[in-house]
Image (spheres, rainbow, N blue to C red):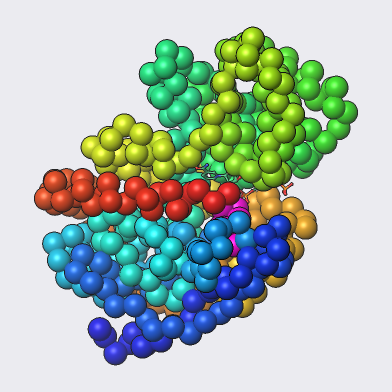
């Protein structure tokens, strides 16, 4: 490897989950470890930024005892600084701006360097977006695409095609993405939020239907029921869980479907069994990796390529898949997550930064030519690579997709 690459690097490790009830009692350490060396088919990425998603900090204290010590962070972005050789690494040569997703928990994105499978873990990023702003390119944007597709596509296969959905925690980064993307899919979204200012935020992004749950319970439930009826809505996606799930379930019409995909308020409660037994409503868990892998490996490659194109187009500032970040460091991330959870998380996705702005600006100048060429050639490169090998490799990444989104 180049002499510019140090032998050792810093990484964040959870050594103990604490009492298992929250982030504050987990023990998290910045450790100095050997910089990984890319093997054939892998690239070494100098990490510029990595987001802290609810599924990330959920894993810090909810993982199995045997998972600790736990390397943390599941997605991020940076620049390829070395490759281990092999056919697939030609799609992301040294200098390429990439987003990456982890396939296991042997490494975490809260690290100065990571090695990633060049075919299944690395996604070339557009050169007109600062690379640190691309760090949330996967978990939330692909989920936004997948949720809207589930409403239209998967459900359609079950004989239902939904033209409207209810979405909770709708001012989340993901919720804001759904608000911006849904019109292009002709889906109406009834956004449910818990604060009045979140309603203003979403309306500013173009949301037509927003219900706030902080006021009188009878009133907001009547408002939500009326919107569900007005839009003939029979499908909901709930990230809140807790009491929200049962409340929402009871407001859906008979035979309606509720997809539970997050646990922001803890265990789901309050389900009226009669809604399941007599009104034939359906309550299902929903996970991005299930959507990706649901129809087999060929379909998954197609979904990744199609979603990737739409996502990359929206990553620029204000674009549909862009995020609003609050920067932190390896040393401060635990303290900043605790503060975030005590306050408001809306529009403040914590992002661990590794490379200062001045260095990023200088590097962008030299790497933009490489990035241009790679983005243009990427789809061709994936298709051209040995088809069997690529499908196998993507299938082998199934477990990774679970790891990316499972721990809520
Ligand atoms: N299943 C999957 O495959 C999958 C994939 C991606 C994301 N997700 C889930 O999607 C959700 C959103 O993720 P994100 O990264 O977009 O989140 P985020 O940007 O961190 O935002 C979280 C939002 O949820 C709100 N919130 C938090 N606790 C709440 C509660 N108890 N009741 C109502 N609202 C609450 C926050 O509002 P305040 O400002 O009021 O705190 C904030 O607007 C998370 O649950 C995440 O795990 C699931």
Quadrant assignment, res 219: top right
Of residues 198 and 228, the one nearer the viewer is: 228
- For the record, the magenta segment spans 53-60
**In the rendered view, does 176 fall on the left or right side of 309?**
right
Which quarter of the image is occupied by the N terminus?
Answer: bottom left
Residue at the farthest right position: 216
Q: Is residue 380 visible?
A: no
Residue at the farthest front position: 66
Decide: is 400 above or below 172.
Answer: below
**In the rendered view, does 10 fall on the left or right side of 279?**
left
Q: Is residue 273 magenta?
A: no
Decide: is 200 above or below 108.
Answer: above
Decide: is 347 above or below 366.
Answer: above
Q: Is residue 300 visible?
A: yes
- Residue ID at (51%, 30%): 182
Q: Position of residue 234 (x, y in %)?
A: 58, 17
Main secondary structure of the magenta stretch: helix
**In the rendered view, does 11 fall on the left or right side of 171?**
left
- Residue ID at (47%, 45%): 141
Q: Position of residue 68 (x, y in %)?
A: 53, 68
Of residues 19 and 346, the one nearer the viewer is: 19
Decide: is 53 above or below 255.
Answer: below
Q: Position of residue 14 (x, y in %)?
A: 57, 70
Q: Is residue 57 magenta?
A: yes
* Tally of numbered tags: 0
Q: Position of residue 399 (x, y in %)?
A: 37, 50
């Amino acid at each position: 490897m180049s002499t510019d690459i140090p032998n050792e690097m810093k990484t964040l490790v959870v050594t103990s989950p604490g009492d298992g009830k929250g982030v504050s009692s987990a023990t998290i350490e910045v450790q100095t470890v050997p910089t990984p060396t890319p093997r054939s088919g892998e690239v070494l990425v100098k990490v510029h930024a990595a987001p802290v998603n609810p599924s990330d900090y959920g894993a810090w204290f909810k993982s199995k005892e045997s998972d600790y010590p736990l390397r943390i962070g599941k997605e991020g972005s940076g620049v390829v600084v070395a490759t281990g050789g092999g056919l697939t690494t030609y799609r992301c040569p040294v200098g390429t701006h990439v987003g990456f997703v982890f396939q296991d928990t042997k490494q975490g994105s809260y690290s100065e360097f990571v090695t990633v499978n060049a075919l299944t873990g690395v996604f070339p990023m557009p050169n007109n977006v600062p690379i640190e702003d691309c760090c949330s390119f996967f978990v939330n944007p692909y989920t936004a695409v997948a949720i809207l597709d589930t409403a239209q596509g998967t459900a359609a296969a079950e004989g239902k095609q939904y033209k409207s959905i209810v979405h909770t925690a709708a001012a989340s980064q993901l919720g804001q993405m759904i608000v911006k993307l849904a019109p292009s899919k002709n889906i109406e979204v009834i956004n449910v939020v818990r604060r009045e200012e979140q309603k203003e935020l979403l309306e500013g992004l173009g949301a037509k239907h927003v219900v706030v749950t902080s006021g009188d319970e009878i009133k907001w439930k009547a408002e939500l029921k009326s919107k569900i009826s007005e839009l003939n809505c029979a499908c909901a996606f709930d990230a809140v869980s807790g009491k929200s799930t049962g409340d929402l379930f009871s407001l859906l019409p008979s035979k309606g479907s509720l997809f539970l995909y997050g646990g922001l308020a803890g265990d789901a409660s309050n389900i009226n069994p009669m809604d399941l037994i007599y009104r034939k409503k359906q309550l299902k868990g929903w996970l991005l990796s299930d959507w990706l892998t649901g129809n087999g490996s060929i379909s998954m490659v197609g979904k990744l390529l199609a979603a990737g194109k739409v996502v990359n187009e929206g990553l620029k500032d204000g674009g549909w898949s862009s995020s609003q970040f609050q920067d932190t460091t390896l040393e401060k991330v635990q303290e900043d997550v605790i503060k975030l959870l005590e306050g408001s998380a809306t529009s403040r996705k914590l992002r661990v930064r590794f490379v200062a702005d001045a260095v990023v600006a200088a590097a962008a100048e030299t790497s933009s030519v490489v990035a241009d060429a790679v983005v243009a050639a990427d789809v061709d490169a994936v298709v051209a690579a040995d088809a069997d090998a690529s499908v196998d490799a993507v299938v082998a990444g199934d477990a990774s997709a679970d790891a990316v989104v499972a721990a809520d």
